[in-house]
Image (tube, rainbow, N blue to C red):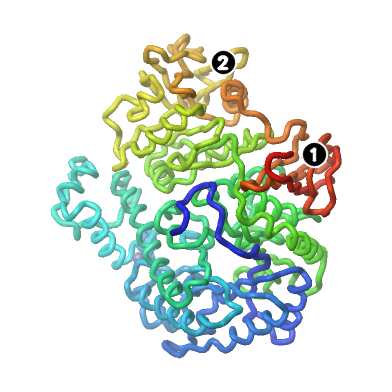
Amino acid sequence: MPAPLSHRRSSKLATFHFGAAYYPEHWDAATRKDDARNMAKAGFNVVRLAEFAWDRMEPQEGKFDFSFFDKAIATLAKEGVQTLLCTPTAAPPRWLTLKHPEVLRIDVNLVPQQHGSRQHACTTHPLFRAYSQKITRAMAAHFKNNPHVVGWQTDNELHCHFSECHCASCQTEFAAFLQERYHGSIDKLNRAWGNAFWALTYTDFTHIQTPRNQKPTHANPAHQLDYYRFLSFAVTRFQHEQVELLRAANPVWFIFHNGLFGHIDYRGQFTKDLDLLGVDNYPFFDLDPVNRNRSQSFNFDRARAWSGNFIVPELQSGPGGQAPYFHDTPEPGEVRRMAYNAVARGADSVMFFRWRTCRFGAEEYWCGIIDHDNVLRRRYAEVKQLGAELKRLGPEVLGTSVHVDAAVATSDQIVNDSHSTYSFGLPGPTAMAETVHGWFFDNGFATGCVHPADDLTGLKLYILPHWAWFDPAWVKNLGKYVAAGGTLVVGARTATRTMENNITAATIPGVLRKLCGLVVDEYGRQNNPAARPLRITLKDTSVLSNLWYEVLKPDKGTQVLARWSGRHLTGKPAITARKFGKGRVVYVGTYLTKEACAALLPSLVSLSGLAPAWPGTPAGVQVVRRVSQEKTLWFFINMADRDAVIKKMPEGIDLVTNKKTAGACTLAPNSVAVIKTVAGTI
Ligand SMILES: [Zn+2]
């Protein structure tokens, strides 16, 4: 039985895989031989192949030819480089779409997608599912005894670019999904969706269409959310069919998918079918070099919150470019540092995108480790250095998990999808989690992301920011956490929507009333906060609320920590705290914006007893711990553009230099130290 999905789950990988995405079909035979040699020199033990090569493996329907990849795999294996294969279903060949144009996806404007790029076929369509199973079955049968094929990626970046489809098949399948969900009772569906509004009552499941928001005006949010649930269900089924075939062929293979994208429940069956999640990581989409470190860390932590440690099948190794943009080029040391950040925050394997930049195609400027001209330059040297270091470090991280003291709730599909159906123009749960996470990150705390249904044991401070859609089943786990001594902070608007995505009948905060010890007496959106400022004062700090206000009415025994000033709110409670068991619940009646975090979180940190990850670490140096019962690995990563002096390091072996640590340490920009200490010592 695989371990349950948890942010603390380590992978079962026996090898730390290090390599790149590789497309031998883009290069001639002599170059491929050179490539294998240069990969071995760079310390690669794996590459990922065949991701978009359906046309090469099944050039005509039913005529399979795997000889090209047999040779490519053998050439790589001669140099000690193993292979991860991909099911190639993100790019169905032309013979398929010519014969069956009905498998092309149809967007929200009812425009069919065209052949000529990728991800143009509908993963719900029974015909396309049959073709997907056919190529997967053929590949699995052909490669099952190849000792150099060690694992698989399913498809590629499912739901990247866009995830909706409104084709005829999706209408049928959506109706079947709803029939199952509402146990065949159309009355149940009508009640759940509130179809009395706008005369939306249905008499048969087959009469229901996929929702088209804004056509002509807003769709019903309950209808919309069930459609998002359907998208997740359908893509999970599509992947499941591939996984079953792969597992049946060779149960030793490990299987992952590379994401993460919208409308997929990565805490559900989608991930339970896999050995681990894959997280593609392109930090340079963030154009701010300082925030880039922060957002890269958040993205890894968010990924870990879905299901635990992960593989990075694609890490940016050069500037990324598509026709309308071209990223900054990573400076010397940045690629290596980004890879260390991945490992620190839960990666149990790292692969770069990609080995060499292709000279043609829509991604001809998505740059790899090697440039178009095949000259080995500084990025190759840097990757080679990392490869040598990971030979020592890689095996050490397997079996460890990332230590977190202060966590923010994130990584829930429905919470985000629900928000998107009715946002009020407010930032969504993921954006707000990133803001809170960023404050902890900047202030040197061991921060992470944890889902409220996960194991919360050991967290000093846990923040649940603005989860309007809220599953009542989570209350028990939160109560257990607080009763055991934790500090829970609940943000405004939490638990205001029901499972069906309607509005709760209970006074806010609904199912969290008992835990929080209050009701919300009045709330409002602040559309022009400068004209009518509202301020919260907490001890000697005060902050302007600029998105949302709530007037709190505490129950007996609930303490008022801060009050409003401004307009008719002056003197009314804005933040409260309630003791619950050995811990406490703090309710904050505003949005936890960057300014609010800076003003309010220091007081909440004091309340919770939270301490920095490694006291005395200068700003710009990130400290992360990966731990097991036997050892701790302390990652010190200098993200600043200047030298950083850490006055006292943990005592142990620096796995980067393979030397004992002694006292202080100076880290140059982009430098990293990874100190191994045995349990019970630092
Ligand atoms: Zn469809």
Q: Quadrant of residue 667?
A: top right
Cα gap from disc 1 to disc 2, whole angstroms: 36 Å
Secondary structure under the numbered disc 1 in the rendered image: loop
Decide if residue 65 is in sight here.
yes
Q: Nearer the viewer, residue 265 or 84?
A: 84
Q: Nearer the viewer, residue 272 or 323?
A: 272
Image disc number at residue 538: 2
Query: Picture coordinates of residue 143 (x, y %)?
Result: 52, 82
Of helix, strand and loop, which one carries label 2?
strand
User: For mark 2, does the 10 Å Cα neighbourhood hold few (<14), some (14 to 19), or many (20 or more) residues?
Assistant: some
Query: Which amino acid type is shown beneath numbered disc 2?
Result: Leu
Residue 8's spot in the image, x, y percent? 54, 47
Other residues around mark 1 within 10 Å, as few (<14) / some (14–19) / many (≥20): many
Task: Identify residue type, mark 1.
Answer: Met
Disc 2 Cβ-to-ligand 1 distance below 8 Å: no
Q: Is residue 589 visible?
A: no
Residue nearest the observer in this picture, 304 or 423: 304
Q: Residue at coordinates 40% horizontally, 71% vertically from top-left?
A: 244
Above or below residue 614? Residue 349 is below
Q: Residue at x 47, y 62 (%)?
A: 274
Question: Residue 645: percent from the left, percent from the top?
Answer: 84, 37
The dot on residue 649 is: 1
The residue that appears at 61% across and 38% down in the rendered structure is: 447
